[in-house]
Image: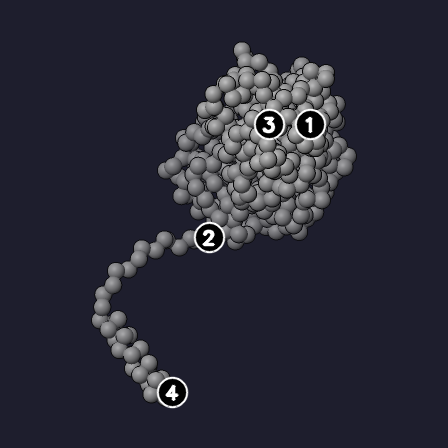
Amino acid sequence: MKNYQRATLVGAIFAALIGCQTTSPTKATAPQLVINDSDDAKISQQLAKQALSSRLSYDIVESLTVEVGPRLAGTDKDIVAVDWAMEKLWLLGFDKVYKESVQVPAWSRGSAHASIVAPYDQPLVVTALGGSVATPVNGIQALIVRFDSLEELSNASPGRIEGKIVFIDHKTERHITGKGYGEAVGGRSRGAIVAAQKGAVAIVIRSIGTDHDRMAHTGMMRYEEGTPKIPAAAMSNPDADLINAMLKRDPNITLSLNLTSENLGIATSYNVIAEVTGSSKPDEIVLIGAHLDSWDEGTGAIDDGAGVAIVTTAAKLIQDLPQKPARTIRVVLYAAEEVGLVGGKAYAAQHADELDKHYIAAESDFGAGPVYKIDFNVNAATFEQVKQEHSAMTLSGVELGNNEASGGPDVSILPALGVPVASLNQDGSDYFDYHHTPNDTLDKIDPKKLAQSAAAYAQFAYMMAQSEIDLRPVTQQKEQH
């Protein structure tokens, strides 16, 4: 044993000596991040600490979900939500609180029933997709034809589809960024158009969700001028699995579908706006937004009550500073995001003459998870400066990301109009478990994680309100849907 240890020691010394005489190439190392310790950065960190120790963000979303609840655009509850927001923002003491009217589509969900009637009699859990027409009064009964994706449906021959109910069985993959949603959502939004063009009498999709609960995920669908409007519904993921098991036994599955949904024309809603007036550049705007509307199945806690709470809390903390920031912080609670970014488009049109004064914009619409990374869409020549300016956010675990941000759904319209944006990316690993379902309720929110997001937005908004960096021109990105 001793001889073995001595031989090992001699070998190690010899290897070290050889290593010292050998010149090996050195790996390039990334420059070490220098944390911004300016007075503004220190104030931003103090804002973050206040957010983390405050229950304000949770109190706001609790108030919205309890006192208002579901608030589908164009309904009476939508206006209740507008009144709630106006009062809440006024009571929080913002310098300005006002609303701007928006014309929105009104739609009633009605009831939704479906079942397999042959060869196995089984009930299914379904919900109408937003904007869907109703079935005939007595419903529709037809054979189903299954497709893995919208792409497969698009490439199918009409002969396979005519007179049948299309079933798109695209599974949504779980991911921190939620990218599985983007890959699957085309079947929901455009499936009825493609199916109708090939002669289908209705379409039913596997829910765009990552859960295994027996509840269906709703969401907006579209029709196209000149193409027949067919009923469209989503079924729960377990029911989609059930149909697949049936198809293994018999390719001829008959589905019965009955929807009583109804389009009700156009209604008036409102974008609700609050401002912290800037001290030296009050006409320049840092916009932080969320959407006020929700689907009618749950109480709209994570989508997007959480976002409303996050941006409102961030702005309130800045409002209460002894010295206001240079630029105005504008909170925009958008109308009718769920039915097609209606409030976002209306805001861009109504504020077209001042978009050149919008310094940067960001929207919180990805639940109540913590912010783990911040991306920007700013002048490429100053992107590194912008990252360095926000480097204090890394002390809270927020990574400095890329320069390809969309900004969030309603805000994604703005880069094409020249407005810089940022995306404060939240952990969405479980977001699509609850998204657009009856399960979108307050108990899904962790107050500490919600507070962390409010802290990140407070830091971001304050630093941008104080920044002297030229953020234009931006790289245009496609708007989100």
Q: Nearer the viewer, mark 2 or mark 4?
A: 4
SS state under label 1? strand
Residue ID at (67%, 41%): 213
At label 2, the amino acid type is: Ile
Q: Is residue 131 above or below residue 302?
A: above
State the image quarter where residue 418 is shown: top left
- In the rendered structure, find residue 117 and report the number of the disc placed on it: 1
Residue ID at (47%, 32%): 420
Q: Nearer the viewer, mark 2 or mark 1?
A: 1
Give the mark nearer the N terminus: 1 vs 3.
1
Give the mark nearer the N terminus: 2 vs 1.
2
Residue at label 2? 35
Nearer to me, 456 or 210: 210
Q: Return the residue found at the far top.
A: 226
* Residue 294 position in % (x across, y down): 67, 30
Q: Nearer the viewer, mark 4 or mark 1?
A: 1
Q: Is residue 421 visible?
A: no
Residue at label 4? 1
Q: Residues within 10 Å of mark 3 (few under 14, many from 20)?
A: some
* Residue 320 position in % (x across, y down): 65, 42
